[in-house]
């Protein structure tokens, strides 16, 4: 267990030792800050405008999904591809760790950074839930906030797992990022290419779209305080499947 | 090479499957039958080829790996395949077996769950089968005819929000397993007509329903039936509250113009669900009782017809049937007035029959003349002609040859010219068309049965039988100055007609009286004013509803009366009367009942929602009151009240010697003069005492039908008690009711055994003391709201009255402009800048090392 923890620590600190982490963090916070700006404007509007669910306004913007789409590939592209490119992967595999421990350690480190990425956004919450410091009560329903963060954590876990798997397949970080970007796009494309409003929600096309489309899960469910097991199972199963494939991908090196 | 070709075939199959899939997606709905199979074949064949090639490649790969690497390689492949199967299987299972948790504070998305909805409705929803089409029709008109002005920002925002809410609710309903198809028709969309035509193919009545919809509506469609729900019946915009929202916030916020919100009054999901569950339910039928076809809903004279009432009721989902109570025959002094009961169709039948008869006579006249002409022009001798003419005319005719020539010339000029021939042809065509209409009507069961039935009571009972609500419309006093009045005697019902209405009430069915004052000008010799109310009013008095034989006049009418003294007909219709008030909905009720009148509350709410006062004015209304020991009103009975600047008048008609005016009471004198005694009010101390307003002119109560209507023995017992009481009148109540304090009906009822049909029923009744507020070709928006709300309440459709139990509004955060600026910029730029700086410091430190 200790070597695994060491590996997690190493991988996690590695993020902060390279400029990429700060660039990603800064860009991410710039975009979410802008979305917070817009959401706050809705919450302080005059007249018949506003946001019924502040988290929906916050996470329902296509700019958010554009940035979100790039983050997992950026975080995962180097995990195995860099090691493979620089030839340190063999060294890593000789460490007293099983393949699954290597994969899990890298994945957890990456996921930890992803969590760190989101931590500053907790600063927005006093406004988004209209927190009263005297009574310690939220004036706006806080439940959609935690369901949104739950959704973000699980969706992030899925996208990171996809990125990790792709990274385990190729040598070039750039190629890894591009491939995982394309794969992630399958789950996010609806944000940029929304279905026509007249599309019947009972139709097969919409149902399929609803099953795969992460932005739709957020706009309809997580940001409105809804938790649906279908989404949770999709995220968890794809994440586990990709982690399994990554382990198997590492294993192939042994018998190649 | 072979491998390459094989893979190429596989790719071609994949391409074909993709094209087929796209073709399927792109198919227009009406072409499905023709093209669906073709595209499906392409997809299946292409997909099958691709799968075959993929399977082959997989097997080849496995063989290769097993051969070249090791058994472990095959195991990995197998594991991967199993993992894929597991991934698909788990997700497929989750699609059909999923759970949803609604974590919102208000359980916003669980409104159709049995906990919130009630087990009954939830069970009915579970039973729902087949597909329901929900058409959301946006004509960008929120308050029907209230909104003549273009919609403002609040209306537009409310429109959008309601559409969202409807879609959310439908999504919730899908969880019950039923299929819902939602179609949005927006008049502002370019393809609105096309989409409407498309839907009209499936639902032929949709076009008609859309055209009649007074406001943004939701239609629930099946091929045979359509139910409408106004947007405001689901979420009603409260414009007043929307505009005033946040006014009580901090001064700093007001300085920032931080006011206003979108406030919607949540009407609950029940009205929506009831429409879904009862798409095929028949519309409630309202019978409108009038005395003359001119006063019915298809009457020819604009100001007397109730066509506006029919339109308003039909637009709001009711069916209307006229019931006419009198047959007027002849004219002037020969006019006879016969008690009757017939429907509009029968009236139309009579009218058509009369027209056809008249036309046939006209045609026969001309044809007779033509026949005569033929005889005269024939080659027969003069004697023969004279003989035939004598036979036809029934008297001896002797015509000379010159006379014959002259007659021919005269008749030729009369019937053989082009105009006469054209006219004759037109008459014949019209006669044929009218005969066709007559035949159509004559095969209608209602008409034939009605004409066959001669017993008025039975006939009336038959007409009332399938009416769910009865409106008795009695237009009387229209203008006292010019004496524009339909005398009460014309409206008075026969005993058998009243008996039929009594039976209707006995069955617990509701009645709405719209009856004007009974005062008639004193100098109409033929039609003297009735000294007492008629038996219909007596019938309602038994239910506790008393109509005063008075008219309410307003202070502002004094001037008009004064003008009429100096100019003939001067001042007629010119007085600006104040609008009526609705009873307070905040619990301050006159009757002491805890609950406000539901109609008054609904009207006040509508007024608040529209953002303007409901301008409901009634000239010459009639005061009324509710008094009953039998069933004390559970809600405040009054819902329409005049302004205090009014008084009750026994004789509202001005004459040379007298102008109606309110005489202030003089201070009490020890010895009243003879004049004072003469002017003393005989009704002093009773509810009919002359006084200043306000007066109740609209009542709506739920009461119990008297037990003596079902059991004559109770009537006798009451009479005995009355005799014993020595004609005392406890509590100032009318004797018939007051005597029940000695012999309570409940005790009597408890001691007798009777089936439901012969037991008292709870019945809803309403009355408005004026008849012509519902007349005309168009009802004012306020009148339309009043009539629709009253009808819904009478029909126990309380869920259709606007409610303000729950409000919805956008959440707001109150921050001073300074705080807003700090939050905005610190989060938008401050945080990224901090991270950038930290990053730079870390990099610099690393470089230093």
Image: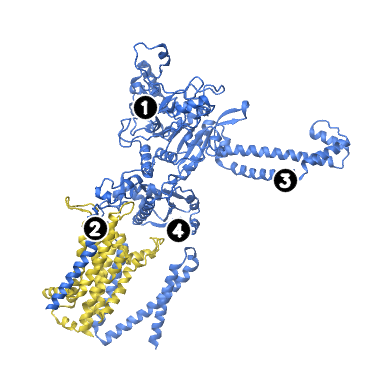
Numbered tag placed on residue B422 in the rendering = 3
Q: Chain of mark 1?
A: B
Q: Of residues B450 and B606, which is closer to you in this image?
A: B606
Colour of chain A as rendered? yellow
Q: Mark 2 or mark 4: which is in front?
A: 2
Q: Chain of mark 4?
A: B
Numbered tag placed on residue B627 in the rendering = 1
Residue carrying label 2:
B821
Judge whether B141 appears above or below B299 on screen.
below
Pick whichever of labels 2 and 4 is earlier in the sequence: 4
Q: Are marks 1 and 4 on the same chain?
A: yes
- At 86% from the left edge and 32% from the top edge, which residue is drawn? B398
Residue B477 visible from this viewpoint = no
Q: Quadrant of residue B831?
A: bottom left
Q: Chain of mark 2?
A: B
Question: Local crowd at mark 2 within 10 Å, few (<14), some, or many (≥20)?
Answer: few
Pick whichever of labels 3 and 2 is earlier in the sequence: 3
Q: Mark 4 or mark 3: which is in front?
A: 4
Residue carrying label 4:
B189
Callout 4: SS: loop
Q: Of residues B675 and B822, which is closer to you in this image?
A: B822
Q: Is the image coloured rainbow, by chain, by secondary structure, or in one colour?
A: by chain
Q: Residue furthest bottom?
A: B1
B731 left or right of B190 in image: left
Q: Mark 1 or mark 3: which is in front?
A: 3
Q: Quadrant of residue A82?
A: bottom left
Pick whichever of labels 1 and 3 is earlier in the sequence: 3
* Residues marked 1 and 2 touching at CB (< 8 Å): no
Judge whether B49 appears above or below B825 on screen.
below
């Amino acid at each position: 267990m200790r070597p695994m923890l060491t590996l997690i620590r190493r991988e996690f600190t590695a993020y902060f030792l390279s400029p990429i982490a700060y660039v990603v963090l800064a860009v991410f916070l710039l975009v979410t800050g802008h979305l917070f700006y817009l959401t706050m404007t809705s919450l302080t509007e005059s007249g018949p405008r506003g946001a019924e669910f502040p988290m929906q306004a916050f996470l329902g913007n296509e700019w958010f999904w554009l940035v979100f789409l790039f983050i997992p590939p950026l975080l995962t592209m180097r995990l195995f591809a860099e090691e493979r490119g620089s030839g340190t992967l063999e060294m890593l595999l000789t460490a007293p760790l099983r393949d699954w421990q290597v994969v899990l350690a890298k994945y957890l480190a990456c996921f930890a950074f992803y969590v760190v990425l989101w931590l500053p956004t907790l600063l927005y919450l006093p406004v988004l839930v209209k927190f009263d410091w005297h009574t310690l009560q939220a004036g706006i329903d806080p439940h959609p906030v935690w369901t949104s963060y739950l959704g973000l954590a699980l969706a992030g876990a899925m996208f990171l797992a996809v990125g990790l798997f792709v990274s385990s397949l190729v040598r070039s970080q750039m190629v890894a990022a591009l491939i995982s970007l394309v794969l992630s796009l399958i789950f996010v494309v609806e944000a940029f290419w929304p279905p026509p409003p007249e599309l019947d929600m009972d139709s097969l096309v919409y149902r399929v779209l609803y099953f795969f489309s992460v932005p739709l899960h957020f706009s309809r469910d997580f940001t409105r305080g809804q938790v649906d097991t279908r989404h949770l199972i999709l995220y968890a199963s794809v994440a586990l499947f990709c982690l399994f494939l990554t382990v198997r991908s590492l294993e192939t090196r042994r018998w190649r | 090479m072979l491998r390459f070709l094989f893979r190429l075939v596989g790719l071609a199959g994949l391409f074909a499957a993709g094209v087929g899939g796209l073709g399927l997606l792109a198919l227009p709905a009406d072409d499905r039958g023709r093209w669906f199979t073709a595209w499906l074949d392409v997809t299946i064949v292409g997909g099958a080829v691709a799968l075959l090639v993929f399977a082959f490649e997989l097997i080849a790969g496995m063989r290769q790996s097993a051969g070249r690497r090791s058994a472990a390689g095959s195991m990995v492949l197998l594991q991967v395949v199993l993992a894929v199967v597991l991934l698909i299987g788990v997700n497929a299972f989750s699609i059909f077996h999923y759970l949803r948790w609604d974590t919102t504070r208000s359980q916003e998305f669980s409104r159709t769950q049995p906990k919130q909805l009630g087990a009954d409705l939830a069970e009915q929803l579970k039973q729902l089968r087949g597909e329901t089409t929900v058409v959301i029709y946006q004509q960008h008109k929120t308050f029907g005819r209230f909104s003549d002005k273009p919609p403002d920002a609040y209306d537009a925002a409310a429109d959008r929000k309601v559409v969202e809410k409807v879609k959310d609710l439908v999504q919730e309903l899908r969880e019950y397993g039923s299929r819902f198809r939602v179609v949005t028709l927006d008049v502002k969309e370019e393809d609105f007509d096309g989409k409407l035509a498309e839907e009209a193919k499936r639902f032929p009545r949709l076009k008609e329903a859309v055209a009649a919809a007074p406001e943004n509506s939701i239609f629930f469609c099946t091929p045979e039936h359509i139910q409408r729900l106004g947007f405001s019946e689901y979420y009603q915009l409260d414009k007043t509250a929307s505009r005033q929202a946040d006014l009580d916030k901090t001064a700093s916020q007001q300085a920032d113009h931080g006011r206003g919100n979108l406030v919607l009054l949540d009407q609950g999901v029940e009205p929506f669900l009831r429409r879904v569950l009862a798409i095929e339910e028949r519309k409630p039928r309202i019978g409108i009782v009038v005395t003359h076809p001119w006063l019915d809903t298809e009457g020819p004279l604009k100001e007397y017809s109730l066509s506006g009432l029919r339109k308003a009721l039909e637009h709001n989902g009711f069916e209307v049937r006229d019931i006419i109570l009198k047959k007027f025959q002849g004219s002037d002094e020969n006019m006879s007035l016969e008690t009757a009961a017939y429907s509009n169709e029968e009236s139309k039948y009579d009218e058509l029959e009369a027209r056809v008869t008249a036309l046939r006579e006209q045609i026969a006249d001309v044809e007779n003349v033509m026949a005569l002409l033929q005889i005269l022009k024939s080659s027969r001798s003069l004697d023969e002609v004279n003989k035939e003419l004598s036979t036809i005319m029934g008297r001896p005719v002797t015509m000379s040859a010159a006379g014959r020539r002259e007659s021919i010339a005269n008749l030729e000029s009369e019937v053989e010219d082009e105009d006469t021939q054209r006219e004759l042809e037109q008459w014949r065509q019209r006669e044929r068309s009218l005969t066709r209409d007559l035949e159509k009507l004559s095969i209608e069961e209602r008409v034939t049965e009605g004409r066959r039935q001669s017993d008025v009571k039975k006939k009336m009972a038959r007409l009332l039988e399938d009416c769910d609500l009865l409106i008795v419309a009695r237009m009387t006093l229209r203008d006292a100055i010019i004496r524009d009045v339909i005398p009460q005697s014309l409206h008075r019902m026969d005993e058998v007609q009243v008996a039929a209405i009594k039976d209707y009430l006995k069955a617990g069915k509701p009645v709405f009286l719209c009856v004007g004052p009974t005062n008639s000008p004193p100098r109409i010799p033929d039609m003297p004013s009735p000294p007492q109310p008629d038996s219909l009013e007596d019938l309602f008095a038994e239910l506790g509803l008393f109509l005063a034989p008075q008219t309410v006049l307003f202070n502002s009418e004094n001037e008009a009366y004064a003008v009429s003294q100096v100019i003939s007909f001067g001042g007629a219709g010119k007085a600006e009367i104040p609008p009526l008030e609705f009873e307070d909905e905040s619990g301050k009720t006159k009757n002491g009942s805890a609950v406000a009148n539901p109609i008054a509350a609904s009207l006040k709410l509508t007024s608040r929602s529209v953002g303007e006062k409901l301008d409901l004015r009634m000239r010459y209304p009639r005061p009324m009151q509710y008094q009953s020991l039998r069933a004390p009103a559970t809600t405040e009975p009054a819902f329409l009240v005049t302004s205090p600047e009014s008084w009750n008048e026994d004789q509202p008609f001005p004459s040379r010697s007298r102008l109606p005016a309110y005489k202030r009471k003089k201070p009490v004198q020890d010895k009243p003069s003879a004049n004072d005694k003469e002017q003393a009010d005989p009704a002093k101390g009773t509810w009919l005492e002359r006084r200043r307003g306000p007066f109740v002119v609209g009542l709506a109560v739920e009461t119990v039908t008297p037990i003596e209507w079902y059991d004559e023995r109770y009537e006798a017992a009451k009479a005995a008690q009355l005799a014993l009481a020595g004609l005392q009148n406890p509590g100032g109540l009318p004797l018939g009711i007051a005597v029940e304090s000695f012999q309570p009906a409940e005790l009597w009822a408890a001691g007798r055994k009777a089936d439901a049909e012969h037991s008292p029923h709870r019945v809803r009744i309403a009355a408005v003391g004026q008849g012509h507020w519902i007349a005309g070709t168009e009802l004012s928006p306020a009148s339309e709201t009043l009539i629709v709300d009253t009808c819904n309440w009478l029909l126990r459709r309380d869920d259709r009255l606007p409610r303000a139990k729950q409000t919805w509004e956008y959440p707001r955060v109150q921050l001073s402009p300074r705080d807003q600026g700090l939050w905005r910029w610190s989060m938008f730029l401050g945080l990224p800048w901090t991270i950038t700086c930290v990053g730079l410091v870390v990099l610099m430190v690393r470089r230093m090392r």
